[in-house]
Amino acid sequence: MMLWTTTGKGAKCDICPHECNLAEGQHGLCKSRVNRGGKIISEVYGHLCALNIDPVEKKPLLHFHQGSNCLSIASTGCNLACRNCQNWEVSQAMPSEVNSIDMSPEHLIMMCISKRCRTIAYTYTEPLTWYEYTRDCAELAHRHGISNILVSAGYINPAPLKEIAPLIDAANIDLKSFSNEIYQKINHASLAPVLATLVTLLKAGTWLEITNLVIPGINDDEELIRQMCRWLKENGFADCPLHFSRFFPNYMMRDTHPTPLKTLLMAHDIAIDEGMHFVYIGNAGEIEGENTTCPDCGKIVVRRDGYTVLDNRIKNGCCPDCGTKIAGIW
């Protein structure tokens, strides 16, 4: 499909809701897409700024092939400009400012096979800004029986999302807040397209997990968290694991304090109260917040220490104590 439209100024990028209208040689807000010869192209196709083997739990995905490794990749670029970005050195940089290695989709798949990774994770920056590479790699991965993981802020237009969704086996979508005003102020984006992405991926059958980074004084309001959890429950996401992650000072928000543990516990309790079945607390080592408990009987069915699975009691996808189905791809 065409990912750009010719305009009087030059060409409009159709990947995301920013729809940057670019003159010849001009870069979009993501810094990695540019107008060359009247076409919008990706300057980072096949140029990786990160290549690592990670536990799938690091994405975070706790209900998808747990205990396995994934080949994690990234190119520069992001269509958000979060003031608290933890990977700003690569997500907010021009491609020319970051060292990269060349990696064709074919070479990437060969590496994944040789490293015995059953999945590829498109992660660290925003893989939807290097859309063509993500799509081509994901399509080739499926031909070789390799699963695809998308770690994304979910800020994408409907048409390109519908094209790539069948190739995505699992995704962790970063739901920054449940306020359009906060999205505009902190993330340089808007809320509605992200909610639409969640709905589209859920309908496509993608295994979904959702992360909400709780920032003190920004999105930690109890009612805001309750509204978010209520929307998720009412729209069919009750079985999608919800991760409340602890904020630490970074980038342009170095003067903001880390999230108090009591705030994370409050968010956890609100989510459970609103009907979310699997709620986790991440990036907070002082709390045992990443064990999986049965939503019916409350018994621990998977015990974890950080990214390590210590004990998995799930039997045929169900709780061994009461038989309740534990949603996930085990």
Image (cartoon, helix red, strand yellow):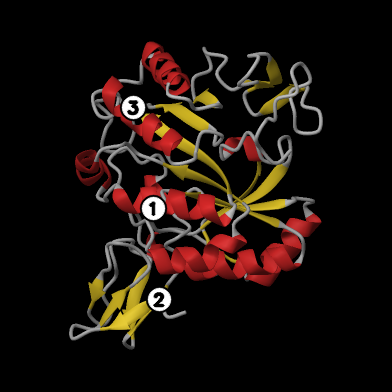
C-alpha distance separating marks 3 and 1? 19 Å
Q: Which label is found at residue 3?
A: 2
Q: Is residue 166 left or right of residue 191?
A: right
Identify the secondary structure beneath mark 2.
loop
Rendered location of residue 51, percent (x, y): 60, 53
Of residues 323 and 282, which is closer to you in this image?
323
State which tag comes first along the sequence, 2 or 3: 2
Amino acid, disc 3: Ile
Name the amino acid type tagged 2. Leu
Find numbered disc 3 in the image and state the secondary structure of the residue it sits on.
helix
Callout 3 crowding tier (Cα within 10 Å): few <14, some 14–19, many ≥20: many
The residues bearing labels 2 and 3 have C-alpha atoms spaced at a distance of 35 Å
> Please, is residue 2 above or below residue 201 in the view?
below
Along the line of sight, the residue nearer the viewer: 235 or 56? 235
The numbered mark, 1 or 2, whose residue comes first in the sequence reads: 2
* Residue plotted at (21% across, 46% down): 184
Of labels 3 and 1, earlier in sequence is 1
Can the viewer see residue 196? yes
Pointer 3 residue: 225
Q: How many marks?
A: 3
Within 10 angstroms of label 2, few (less than 14), some, or many (20 or more) residues?
Answer: some
Viewer-nearest residue: 271 or 259? 271
Spatial CA span between label 1 and label 2: 19 Å
Residue drawn at (53%, 65%), measured in percent from left and top? 164
**Relative to 46, residue 309 above or below:** above
Quadrant of image for the C terminus: top right
Task: Give the residue pinned by disc 1.
Answer: 196
Q: Position of residue 65 (x, y in %)?
A: 72, 41
- The type of residue carrying mark 1 is Ala
Q: Is residue 103 visible?
A: no
